[in-house]
Image (cartoon, helix red, strand yellow):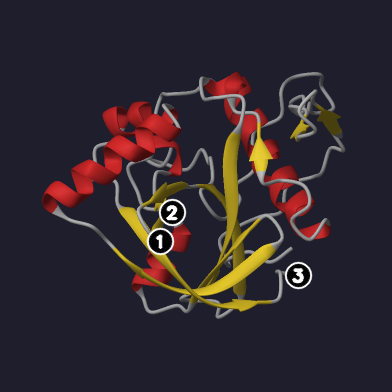
Amino acid sequence: MRYDSHCAPVRQIDTGYVRTKTGLYLQRLAKPRHDRMGGAAKPDTICGDSFSRGPGTMPSTYDDDTTARMTQWVTDHRESYLSSGGARGHIMDMSFLGGYRYEPMLLLRNVGRKSGKTMINGLGYTQFGPEIAIVASKGGADDHPQWYLNIQAGSPVAFQIATQAFAATWREPTGGEKEEAWTWVIKGNPLFAQYRQVSKRDIPIVLLNPLEEIPVFRE
């Protein structure tokens, strides 16, 4: 795995996948880790649209147990997406958080503005006209996710949906177009309405424009 300098790796739990009647593979929800004294372990900080417990970074949307599950879920999802070449990880079950059972996910590749290292983040997405909309929500936190700060700083951008990857350009909608994008995003994933409500910041929406197709992402 590659992380920004402030990030720490999270231990893996092999949760496996469940095949549905429609043939889709959905990842089982990981159980929270426990420390040696039998109490729930504190979630580690990870990169991407992460769920950390640093000062001012995590809203009261989730309790400690749910935060720990989400932290592990984000790590497991990213690693499964990458290791399978996109055969797994595109469609995920988010109903345990209040989302839909079938949520589409992509991988976003960017470069750390401080470390210079390649970062790959798993994010939900919505089709918005000819563009792909992603949300810099960070679970409703009051600070921006690292991937958003990286692309703002000029990082090249690429994304992978299932087994296809593309170089991309990006832009941020404003005004009425941004509100229209929010409507589409929330229809696709109601969790974003909750994140927008609890966050003190104006959460950015990023619109990705695919260019040429490129090889799928690897570590």
Task: Give the residue at x 45% y 37%.
Answer: 139
* The N terminus sits in image quarter: bottom right
Expressed as whole percent of the image width and height from the top left, the position of residue 169 reads: 40, 74
Question: Mark 2–mark 3 contact, CB under 8 Å?
Answer: no
Marks 3 and 1, how far apart at CA = 21 Å
Residue 145's disc is 2
Q: Which residue is mark 3?
A: 218
Residue type of the residue flagged with mark 2: Pro
Task: Give the residue at x 46% y 60%.
Answer: 146
Expressed as whole percent of the image width and height from the top left, the position of residue 12 reads: 82, 43
63 left or right of 205 in image: right
Question: Mark 2–mark 1 contact, CB under 8 Å?
Answer: yes
Residue type of the residue flagged with mark 3: Arg
Q: Which residue is mark 1?
A: 148
210 left or right of 8 in image: left
Q: Is residue 64 visible?
A: no
